[in-house]
Amino acid sequence: MRHWAALAWLLLATPGPEPLVLPGFRLHLEVSEDVDPDRLEALARPGVVLWLRTTSNLVKRSVAERLGRAEASYVQVRSPFGEAVRAQFGPRVHPWVALEGLDAGAFRRWAPAGTAVDVVGTLSPERAQALQAVRPQLVRWQPEGEPAPEEWARTAGLSGLEVHPVTLLPACPRPVKGAGHIRLRVLAPQADVAASGCGFALRLEVPVSISEAEVQQLLVHFPGSELWAHVGNDAEAAAAATLVSVLTAAVPVARPPAAPGGR
């Protein structure tokens, strides 16, 4: 909370900003299955990636319909996997699994395209090999400490990698090889100090109640960053819908070209 209080003070001390204008945006929302499907409706928009946490492998039809309207959606599933589970996925809706305890070979034979995989702890050679076997579209890695150089080297073959460390990563004397293709997820107020000089792209954790002025301050200071927020209930879903509206309104609407000879 101290970090957000400091950011609020800075905004008050700064002259009023120009209107927020973005070429596009990417907002990741990690959503509880307890959120009402009607609330989910306002979140399933272009530019929004939904991560649906579940207690079972099957989602309600009303939820599934809305997931397909987002830029992309990932549904948390666990073994055993069956055809009824697989039927939920499509071009924009994908499975989201944990590597721990996963039979990578069996899963790969079952899985539709676009899998996201969570990895916690050391990125050992065995884990890196298991990830390669799954062939995920996205990997979310949560190291428990500062990764060793050989762990960073093993990320070279991983696509769509997000690194979400338990503790702040120290500054780097030189950029990490391939860091520009890795998203480092950190609390937004820590973005200036987390892994400075390493060269990572950023995914900034923000509260869903963040104001338009705070969003603008972040995206001006950290251009190209993606945003991430947690949505645990209907009230947070309503706040997230406001955030989605702010970001959507900041992207200019492309006008169709004028007809030949038109004025």
Image: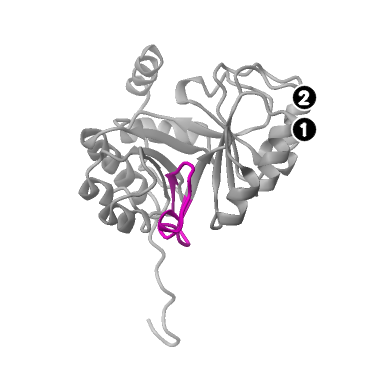
Q: Residue at x 38, y 61 (%)?
A: 253
Task: Give the left or right position of residue 4, taking residue 60 as reference.
Answer: right
**Could you tell me residue 91's position as x and y percent?**
48, 62
Vertical position of residue 122 compared to residue 60: above or below: above
Amino acid carrying mark 1 in the image: Ala
**Between 152 and 97, the one nearer to me in the picture:** 97
* Number of the label disc, if any, that sits on residue 149: 2
In the rendered structure, find residue 189 and report the number of the disc placed on it. Answer: none
Q: How many marks?
A: 2
Q: Residue furthest bottom?
A: 261
* 77 inside magenta stretch: yes
- In this view, 54 is above or below 14: below
The reply to whether dot 1 and dot 2 touch (C-beta < 8 Å) is yes
Q: Which residues are magenta?
A: 72-94
- Above or below — where is 137 with respect to 156? below
What residue lies at 35% left-to-right and 37% top-to-bottom?
55
Amino acid type at image mark 2: Pro
From the top left corner, tell me how far across and down residue 27 is, in percent. 43, 42
Helix, strand or loop status at disc 2: helix
Q: Which residue is mark 1?
A: 153
Q: x and y percent of residue 210 in the render?
A: 32, 30
Q: Is residue 23 visible?
A: no
- Quadrant of image for the N terminus: top left
The reply to whether residue 60 is in sight is yes
